[in-house]
Image (cartoon, grey):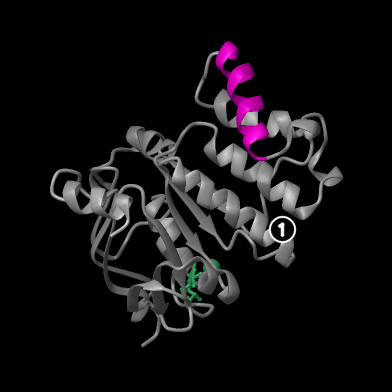
Amino acid sequence: MAKFDLYRELTRDIEPPVISLENVTKDYVDGLHALKNLSLQIDKGEFVFIVGSSGSGKSTLIKLLLKEINPSSGKIMVNGKTLSRLRESSICKHRRGIGVVFQDFRLLQDRTVYENVAFAQRVIETPAYKISREVPRILSVMGLSEKLDRYPSELSGGEQQRVALARALVNNPVILLADEPTGNLDPKNSWEIMRLLEEVNRRGTTVVVVTHNREIVDAMQKRVITLNKGVLISDKKGGYSNAKN
Ligand code: ADP
Ligand code: MG
């Protein structure tokens, strides 16, 4: 058993999962389940892929975890909090514990790389001295030290996604959610992003990655949760190909 797996076994009873869903159902339209009776747990420090064909409920799961939408029934806990019990005033704090990246990067086009990342700290009123220390640090981890003053339109897709990752991570979230982060990238840049996600995970962040990239999932041999039409059909360690049986 790998050292980290052993640690997780030993601490399982002490540390509750960072993400827990119990019988979660989400209907957008009456009678049509985007997610149906979904139960799963993700422990602190795990790296998990979520796979499944288009429309299987992957993005719905991400939105539920962020409390952008609420389940029709069932219970969701994130970072020790039951989401249905969060008041309006606590929702911001809840989201602060989660970094998110999307397929389409979602950068502010009229701001530089530095400002895109600093923005995530300004909105939570981080002191200026901390911003000027943290922003270059995380951009350096992402290999972007040379690009601080560039605008998103001057960057490649891979670089833009690395800025988005820096922005998602600058406030040290417990969880990183990535919804098809390599969907717009070529294989080389896709691998670069995955390598960074693995590094982020190695440093202790729990990482959940929605992806269609079979080759990467097969190569990385992580836990793979497969959804099909809103139902969890497989949850095991290994590749994409063997996930369904
Ligand atoms: P995935 O990310 O796996 O492609 P989604 O979670 O986006 O799947 O969607 C799951 C199902 O819910 C699909 O049938 C989709 O059409 C439906 N759906 C998603 N968002 C909405 C919405 N805002 N209103 C109505 N139906 C939706
Ligand atoms: Mg989706």
**Residue 45 seen:** yes
The residue stretch that appears in magenta: 128-142
**Residue 185 seen:** no
Based on the picture, tell me whether residue 138 belongs to the magenta stretch: yes
Q: Residue furthest bottom?
A: 245
Residue at (67, 46) in percent of width and height: 162
Total marks placed: 1
* Quadrant of res 154: top right
Which quadrant is home to the N terminus? bottom left
Front residue (pair 199, 232): 199
Q: Is residue 224 left or right of residue 194?
A: left
Q: Position of residue 135 (x, y in %)?
A: 63, 26
Front residue (pair 116, 197): 197
Q: Quadrant of ligand 2?
A: bottom right
The residue tagged with tag 1: helix, strand or loop? helix
Q: Does the residue tagged 1 have its C-beta within 8 Å of any atom of ligand 2?
A: no
Q: Position of residue 58 (x, y in %)?
A: 46, 68
Q: Main secondary structure of the magenta part?
A: helix
Residue at (73, 47) in percent of width and height: 160
Q: Position of residue 224 (x, y in %)?
A: 41, 70
Residue at the disc numbered 1: 189
Q: Residue furthest left?
A: 13
Q: Position of residue 233 (x, y in %)?
A: 33, 81
- Of the residues shown, which amino acid type is indicated by label 1? Asn
Based on the picture, tell me whether residue 20 belongs to the magenta stretch: no
Residue at (45, 65) in percent of width and height: 49
Q: Is residue 178 left or right of residue 142?
A: left
Which quadrant is home to the C terminus? bottom left
In the image, residue 245 sits, relative to residue 4, either above or below, namely below
Residue at (82, 46) in percent of width and height: 155
Neighbour class for label 1 at 10 Å: few (<14), some, many (≥20)? some
In the image, residue 79 sits, relative to residue 113, either above or below, namely below
